[in-house]
Image (cartoon, rainbow, N blue to C red):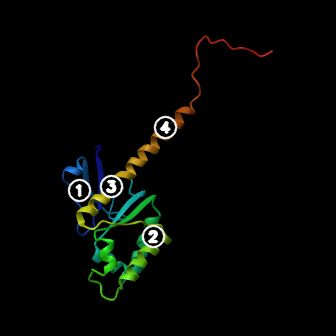
Amino acid sequence: MEPLTIVADTREQAPFHFDGAGYDGVNVVTKKLEVGDYSILNLEDMVACERKSLADLTRCLSTDRPRFVRQLQRGRSLESYCVVVEGSWHDLASGNYAARGLHPHAACQSVAAFVSRLHVPFLFAGSRTAAEYLCWSFLRQYVMGLRHRLRAVEQAMSALQPPKVVPNARVMRMP
């Protein structure tokens, strides 16, 4: 696996470490990010991943909703952005969270509205370990897609090169 440098936001309270056998070649640096909690070094203005615990998500869907909407809108400005939730959809839909006053149906409908209206995917991982893997996978797939696009551009550019001049070539003239 090729090296990958992930940027973790300096304000991230419980950062992922991306260590272990599955994360060979991953380096993590901390830096203030304008959008999201994780990105790729030098691609911070193109891709980001926002991490939420279930408790944090339910707070964002209720008392911190205006701030969260602004956060999602900033994420939309990137080429690729997602919210990775450490909890499961089942936990959200069943009300297995501490937020009082937030009905499970309202929480689910809020997420569905954000996905539909703002075009921001929410990936429910079901655990912190799975959320870390999803975040890494999302960022890695973005980089792999960029590499693929770059190869396609390089091929297109090489096709635009003028033909090579062959010395002593005969030029045929039309009558």
Q: Which residue is mark 3?
A: 137
| Image position of 153 (left or right of 83) | right
Sequence-wise first label, 2 or 1: 1
Residue 140 placement, left or right of 18: right
The label on residue 18 is 1
Q: Which mark is residue 154?
A: 4
Q: Amino acid at mark 1?
A: Phe
Measure the C-alpha gap from mark 2 to mark 1: 27 Å
- Closer to us: 56 or 89: 89
Does the CB distance between marks 1 and 4 fall below 8 Å? no
Q: Residue at x 18, y 53 (%)?
A: 20
Q: Nearer the viewer, residue 170 or 105?
A: 105
Q: How many marks?
A: 4
Residue labelled with disc 2: 115
Q: Quadrant of residue 62?
A: bottom left
How far separated are the C-alphas under marks 3 and 4? 25 Å
Which of pointers 1 and 3 indicates the residue nearer the eye? 3
Q: CA distance from mark 2 to mark 4?
A: 34 Å
